[in-house]
């Protein structure tokens, strides 16, 4: 299984909405991908509830954890039109993105 984890920092305002509103919209969009993309086996989206800064900087605002049976399934997900449409909005509201993809032993 392949696990895809992404964390984003959002702009304070973008697309005519606050960071908080855009985080909620991202959550709905990302969770909705499971309905339209068969390759997604599991998806979890979280909105950060901590506003504490530390030595490393401010926390990330939104996290996505999604699972795919195979690397091919993950590749198909990245090429899906629904995913590309979601990215268009996400890229317009974020300042920063970090991700990791790894194999999960089952």
Image: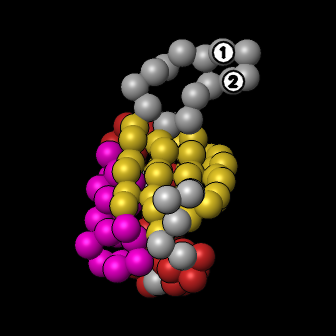
Q: Nearer the viewer, residue 15 or 1?
A: 1
Magenta region includes residue 38: yes
Judging depth in this view, the residue of 77 and 95 nearest the camera is: 77
Which residue range is magenta in the image?
Answer: 24-41
Q: Is residue 78 visible?
A: no
Q: Residue at x 47, y 69 (%)?
A: 68
- Res. 37 in view: yes
Q: Residue at x 44, y 32 (%)?
A: 48
Question: Quick one: SS at disc 2?
Answer: loop
Q: CA distance from mark 1 to mark 2?
A: 5 Å
Q: Are marks 1 and 2 in contact (CB under 8 Å)?
A: yes
Q: How far across and down, in percent of the image, does residue 63 sit?
A: 48, 45
Q: Which mark is residue 54?
A: 1
Residue 88 point in image, percent of width and height: 50, 69
In percent of width and height, residue 64 lies at: 47, 51
Question: Which mark, residue 57?
Answer: 2
Does 30 appear in magenta?
Answer: yes
Q: Residues within 10 Å of mark 2 (few under 14, many from 20)?
A: few
The x, y position of residue 13, in whole percent, is: 48, 42
Which secondary structure dominates the residues rendered in magenta?
Answer: helix
Q: Nearer the viewer, residue 71 or 49?
A: 71
Q: Residues within 10 Å of mark 1 (few under 14, many from 20)?
A: few
96 over 67 or under it: above or below: above
């Amino acid at each position: 299984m392949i696990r895809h984890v992404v964390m984003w920092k959002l702009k304070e305002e973008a697309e005519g909405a606050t960071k908080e509103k855009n985080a909620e919209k991202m959550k709905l969009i990302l969770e909705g991908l499971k309905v339209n993309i068969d390759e997604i086996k599991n998806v979890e989206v979280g909105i950060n509830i901590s506003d504490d800064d530390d030595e490393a900087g401010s926390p990330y605002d939104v996290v996505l954890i999604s699972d795919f049976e195979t690397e091919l399934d993950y590749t198909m997900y990245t090429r899906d039109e629904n995913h590309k449409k979601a990215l268009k909005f996400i890229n317009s509201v974020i300042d920063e993105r970090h991700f990791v993809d790894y194999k999960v032993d089952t």
